[in-house]
Image: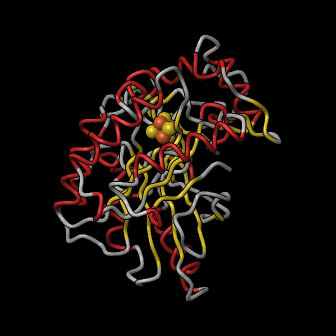
Amino acid sequence: MIETIYLERDVRDHFRSRQIIERFPDARVIECERYGEIFNRKAQDFRAQKLRPSLILAGKAGRFVLPAPAGYGVGGARHYYFSHMLNCLYDCRYCFLQGMYRSAHYVLFVNFEAFAEEIALTSNESDAETWFFSGYDCDSLALEPVTGFVSFMLERFPEHSKTFLELRTKSTQIRPLLGVAPRSNWVVAFSLSPDSVARALEHKAPSLVRRVAAMRRLQQAGWSVGLRIDPMVMYDGWESDYREFARWVFAQLDGSNLHSVSLGGFRAPKSFFEKMVRLYPAESLFAGPLVDNDGVIGYPSPMARQMSEFMIGELAGYVARERVFVCND
Ligand code: SF4
């Protein structure tokens, strides 16, 4: 699956780089000074790279943990995110990463230990409930068999009762989690959409049925599971699809045992959106009805509110209202 691996000189001899390279004996390995030389190069063809992405192994420098954007939380006091990877195995048409990055290659930062250290330091700064979100610039589990990041975090993430980790994913790579005792301060949050939306927009991601089966297995094994219905998209017949979706999902899952649900309408920063449209000009999702809300392209506010209120109503019989969070920022 990986034909080319770019290897930053500083992590050439890192044990994790060596392990990963051994998994792809047929891949050509090309050394580089800094990953940005490859990843940030101008005039790259994102769509072509998405068909055959390379892997870039790099060492992260600077800040490892950053404050999460407004509206990203699920009720804690402090929210942070971190990205051990940039880019994703899947190819969702609404994904803002395609508007944010010049390249579709995967960047994997192999110095996991530095992430764990900064998470521990940030957690120790306060007694307030603190959340760390993984899966902002990638999918938390999709490349787990290659990266082993979640397995690493199972050993290293703080056990404090007020320090939480959210793994956000569409992946069914849950084996490392099923192999250990559930962590009471972890939430495995699955992004789901109605089947029609998933088929139309969430290319290469596991089907709705497979994702919900993974959630069910985790719930049965005692893991805390969350549901993310974000982004919601509007089209003729969206209400009946989202209603049927809620009914079907909660026929499979124990809603009373669900950690949280967050939801929000499709939105993207204007500059990212413009690039997304250039990549897929015929994509009907981008045709509207979308407006510029102070630099963020999304549904007009009354429409976004209508969507969230509709979904909150549909969830009412399954999930307590205080566990439902709306993220329209
Ligand atoms: S799963 Fe998430 S990160 Fe991956 S392409 Fe889809 S939206 Fe982007």
Residue 148: percent from left, percent from top: 33, 55
Residue 137: percent from left, percent from top: 55, 47
Q: Which residue shows up at 39% across the image and 29% down it?
A: 241
Indicate the quadrant where residue 281 lies: top right
Q: Is residue 212 left or right of residue 46?
A: left
- Pick the front one: 257 or 149: 257
Indicate the quadrant where residue 258 lies: bottom left
Image quarter where the N terminus lies is: top left
The correct choice, above or below, for 153 with respect to 39 in the image is below
Please say which color scheme the image uses. Answer: secondary structure
Q: Which residue shows up at 77% across the image and 33% down it?
A: 271
Residue 238: percent from left, percent from top: 47, 28
- The number of discs equals 0
Residue 179: percent from left, percent from top: 17, 62
Could you tell me if residue 286 is visible in this image?
yes
Could you tell me if residue 56 is visible in this image?
no
Q: Which residue shows up at 43% across the image and 21% down it?
A: 200
User: From this viewpoint, which residue is outermost toward the bottom?
Assistant: 127
User: From this viewpoint, which residue is outermost toward the right?
Assistant: 294
The correct choice, above or below, for 222 with respect to 263 in the image is below
Q: Is residue 236 left or right of residue 299?
A: left
- Pick the front one: 85 or 235: 235
The correct choice, above or below, for 27 with respect to 219 in the image is above
- Pick the front one: 303 or 157: 303
